[in-house]
Image (cartoon, rainbow, N blue to C red):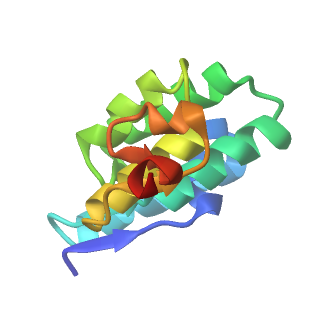
């Protein structure tokens, strides 16, 4: 096993550190996994990062900035890495202006699968590199 992906429940647990006992157990289990499968990469997809962002706000009461910061900390920790690499970390920082994080993750996911341009009706999103207004392509 060279790599595996995590789901939202694991990323939220790591980012929220709640409940504390489950956070500790998750970290211990991930460290055990790394010890058992040397060189394994444990990855979070754009979808999992986006769902975690929403969950941290809705269920844990974090602000958008706090949720982005918590996710950034986990994704830089060395325990979990973003499947789309450094571009996710850049996206987490850029999302404080213009288009939101979810929209930016959608563009990043489309780019990862070589599906650009991403077509949209959203004028803010259309300003993000890789996104285009549908009407501009048919005009």
Residue pushed farthest bottom? Answer: 1
Residue at 47% of width from left, 38% of height from top? 126
- Residue 12 rendering spot, x and y as whole percentages: 64, 49
- Residue 9 rendering spot, x and y as whole percentages: 65, 61
Residue at 30% of width from left, 56% of height from top? 111
Residue at 43% of width from left, 60% of height from top? 45
Residue pushed farthest front? Answer: 139
Residue at 39% of width from left, 40% of height from top? 75
Give the answer, above or below, for where 109 lies relative to 90: below
Q: How many tags in the picture?
A: 0
Residue pushed farthest left? Answer: 39
For residue 65, say whether it is visible.
yes
The image quarter containing residue 138 is bottom left
In the image, taking residue 55 as reference, residue 99 lies left or right, namely left
Give the answer, above or below, for where 102 lies relative to 106: above
Give the answer, above or below, for where 118 lies relative to 57: below
In the image, taking residue 91 as reference, residue 103 lies left or right, namely right
In the image, taking residue 39 as reference, residue 90 lies left or right, namely right
């Amino acid at each position: 096993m060279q790599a595996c992906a995590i789901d939202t429940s694991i990323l939220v647990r790591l980012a929220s550190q709640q409940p504390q006992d489950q956070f500790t157990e998750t970290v211990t289990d991930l460290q055990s996994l790394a010890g058992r499968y040397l060189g394994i990469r444990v990855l979070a997809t754009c979808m999992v990062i986006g769902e975690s962002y929403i969950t941290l706000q809705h269920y844990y009461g974090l602000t958008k900035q706090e949720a982005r910061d918590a996710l950034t900390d986990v994704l830089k920790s060395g325990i979990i890495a973003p499947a789309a690499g450094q571009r996710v970390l850049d996206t987490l920082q850029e999302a404080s202006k213009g288009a939101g994080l979810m929209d930016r993750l959608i563009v990043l996911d489309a780019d990862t699968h070589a599906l650009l341009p991403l077509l949209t009706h959203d004028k803010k999103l259309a300003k993000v590199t890789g996104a285009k207004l549908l009407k501009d392509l048919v005009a």
